[in-house]
Amino acid sequence: MVAQTRLEPNGTLEPTWLAAHPLAGSAVITVLTGLGLQLTHLVDFEERMSSVVGWTLWLQIIDFGFRNIFGVLVVLIILPYLFGHVRNRPWFVRYLRYMRLSSGSNPRLTAAATAASALILAALVIGLGMATGALKVGPAFWGEDSRWFILILALVPALWEELAFRGLMLTNLQRRYRPWMAVVLTGGFFGLMHFSNLVIREPQQVVAEVMMATAVGIAWGYVVAKTGSVVPAMVLHYFINVLIGLTLDPELDEAASAVVFGSVTIVYPVVTIIATWWLARSMGRHRPLAAPSEEPTRELSRSTS
């Protein structure tokens, strides 16, 4: 049971049980986010409608709308209630600040780290795609009705998953654990969330996605912790889905798939972390990862129970 938040004599708010136990809270975030964003697949919306009228553009838009509704419900209504953010009104802007939905402490670093990570990813994916013959950029490939729709559909995980994981979860974990531990734990839970893809993909594909999501999640978590902004993770999450979806042949052969998987899972996260560290150092922001400021969330006391 989730304990109710109550006002302490000093005016602060006692955190709910989930807020005071970030590992349990992280598990709840993972489950609710996975269920919310996969709900249309769980009810076989695409399969049921495809068998009747085909998977038309309008149905894809409806599916996109449903996913956003569930994203709003989970990330902006259910989770802030469970973690006690709604108890101190006005709460909504404070909640967004808690999730670091801002330009960060140094907007130049935020922009530079985002651009560097995107360029690293583009160089790897496009370069290796060309080398392996997996790169598809012809008009016939892009002309498929479903191909371009990823520009819209990719907004769903980029927005709601990042607010839930690199926003709410990472901030919660950083208030209890060492910064690097919080980053790694967030990446691990993010990877586990991708097991929800078992409803639409084969198990071996899902295992690979879990590994990739964990690795890139750690890199994005590092960028967020370093810049103080969740925006880079949102932009990079959107970019990786769009880049891979628009440029790579979905029917990769085994060799090409292994090369791309290895580069995105190992090389990309490592180089992103190094580049972000170097940029922070060169911009005078080189310092150990630290917990987010207490000021935006002073209404939630640090409980160690």
Image (cartoon, grey):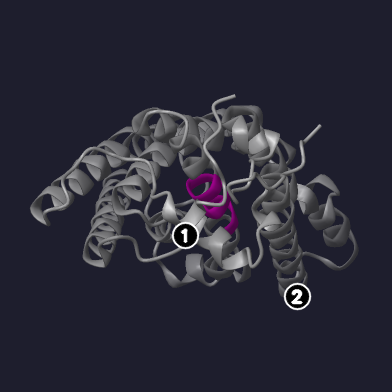
Please state which of residues 115 and 4 is positioned toward the viewer in this rendering: 4
The secondary structure that most of the magenta stretch takes on is helix
**Rendering coords of residue 2 (x, y %):** 77, 36
Q: Which residues are magenta?
A: 160-168
Residue 58 is tagged as: 2
- Residue at 52% over, 57% down: 158
Question: In the image, what residue occupies the spot 26% across and 46% down?
Answer: 131
Q: Which residue is mark 1?
A: 238
Q: Which mark is residue 204?
A: none
Quadrant position of the N terminus in the picture? top right
**C-alpha gap between disc 1 and disc 2:** 22 Å
Judge from the rendering whether residue 256 lies leftward or rightward of residue 115; answer left or right. right
Q: Secondary structure at mark 2?
A: helix
- Percent position of residue 134, x then y: 38, 49
| Residue 181 horizontal/vertical position (percent) | 40, 27
Q: Is residue 41 left or right of residue 52?
A: left
The foreground one among 302 and 167 is 302
Q: Nearer the viewer, residue 39 or 18?
A: 18
Please, which residue is most extreme toward the bottom here? 58
Under tag 1, what secondary structure? Answer: helix
22 in magenta: no
Given the image, on which type of amino acid does mark 1 rest? Tyr
Looking at the image, residue 3 sits to the left or right of residue 266; the answer is: right
- Residue positioned 44% across, 40% down in the render: 217
- In terms of image quadrants, where is residue 115? bottom left
Residue found farthest to the top: 305
Total numbered labels placed on residues in the image: 2
- The image quarter containing residue 54 is bottom right
Q: Which is closer to the viewer, label 1 or label 2?
A: 1
